[in-house]
Image (cartoon, rainbow, N blue to C red):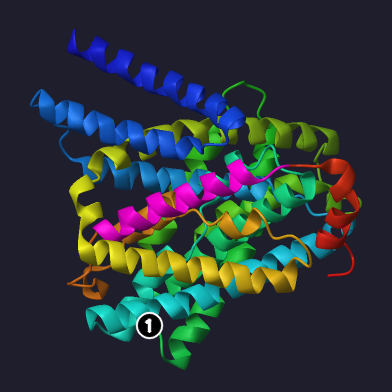
Amino acid sequence: MQSYYVILFLCLLVMLSYVFTLISKYTRIPSVVLLLGTGIGLKYLGDSYHLALAGVNDYVQMLGTVGLIMIVLEASLDLHVTREKTSLIRNSFLSAIVILAVSVIAITLVLQFWLHESFINSLVYAIPLSIISSAIVIPSVTHLEENKKEFLIYEASFSDIIGIIIFNYFTAGEVFSLQSLFGFVGGIVAGIIISLVVSVFLIYMLTKIRINIRFFLIFSILIFLYVSGKMLHLPSLIIIMMFGLLINNWHLLRRQQLVKWSFFDNNEVEQIALLMKSLTAETAFLIRTFFFVIFGYSINVGMLFNKEVVIVGTLIVGILLLARVLLLRFFVHSSVMPEVLMLPRGLITIVLFYIIPENLRLKSFNEGILFYVVLLTSLLMMVGLMIHTTDKPKKEEEERAVFGETA
């Protein structure tokens, strides 16, 4: 009977998450906030009946690792490259990398000053706190104008990918040496080459496998390659990113001689891309549901009212907000609402915190700061989505100026 109760409970969570998605669509309250609230509520309910879930941190880390892979794949499958979008892609990439860099430096200085810890250790903690969560942004911006939506999706995706690469570099070992720098750059170059070969092979597999069970085989291979690469200290996340980019932008290659000589059916590749997007989105939805509920369950709400947590957490969020307000003006030449409030921290931030090496951990860092930043940035995004209104007749010309060729 216990196994039946567990199955019923998991099914109810999925159905509840779907309801939250519908609620989010009409109220603009991010579903992640509702999922976190559900997890917190379950914790209090369990405490009331003296029930507890063992090994919560292990579940968070395991789901987070798989979720990280699916989110990067989902993000790369959303990056559709065309000549008309060159300006938009350039602006979103520059916005992501500049805001990330400024946020990392400022938060590092705050942590170093407040906690009296080393610069490198503070920097390693600042990187996850500076990464925008595409896992929250992508499903939350569906109702926005097309140009704003695309800008935010590209920016969040670039922030994820760049932030993870930088985090991997600073946690790999000695960083302030030419040998480590060349090794890191060489690893990225090698990773890109390997990724292209692996991606083409996987796409070939998808076009040639005739049985229905093929997409989760590809997911399993991608997860296997990622975990194997991490164990060998290789930038294996690039494989995930390149696979998504390649399959979603096959139109850029189909006229090239390489593809003409190949055995690829271009129409079939495009159909596979559509199915891959759908399956990836469904899988990412499922993982997000369980991850944020379990993460909410793991939150000690009492820590959120700690004086140090409130001061440092508010200061960090203030830095993130100020960086977006100032720097988005360079990339968005008109209205920057609700873009300035679209700064949620989520799955990637949490997962990276869990995998920080022991020798780089801050001894005096209060984990309540992480919880506080995740909740406050999600609430700010909720406010931005709720106060933003779309007036297409008045804003049509403005939107072209915001993301058009003038940038």
Q: Which residues are magenta?
A: 368-389
Q: Quadrant of residue 129?
A: bottom left
Residue indicated by mark 1: 109
The stretch drawn in magenta includes residue 374? yes
Residue at 49 percent of width and 53 percent of height: 344
Q: Main secondary structure of the magenta part?
A: helix
Image height check: is 224 above or below 11?
Answer: below
Q: Viewed as shown, does residue 402 lie left or right of 286?
A: right
The amino acid type, in three-letter code, at marker 1 is Leu
Image height check: is 1 above or below 23?
Answer: above
Residue at 83 percent of width and 70 percent of height: 407
Q: Quadrant of the N terminus?
A: top left
From the top left corner, tell me how far across and down residue 386 is, in percent.
Answer: 59, 41
Residue pushed farthest left? 50
Residue at 22 percent of width and 74 percent of height: 359
| Front-most of residues 347 and 178 | 347
Q: Viewed as shown, does residue 304 lie left or right of 279?
A: left
From the top left corner, tell me how far across and down residue 355 is, in percent.
Answer: 31, 60
From the top left corner, tell me how far across and down residue 80 is, in percent.
Answer: 76, 50
Does the rendering let one see residue 232?
yes
The stretch drawn in magenta includes residue 23? no
Residue at 66 percent of width and 54 percent of height: 152
| Front-most of residues 167 and 219 | 167
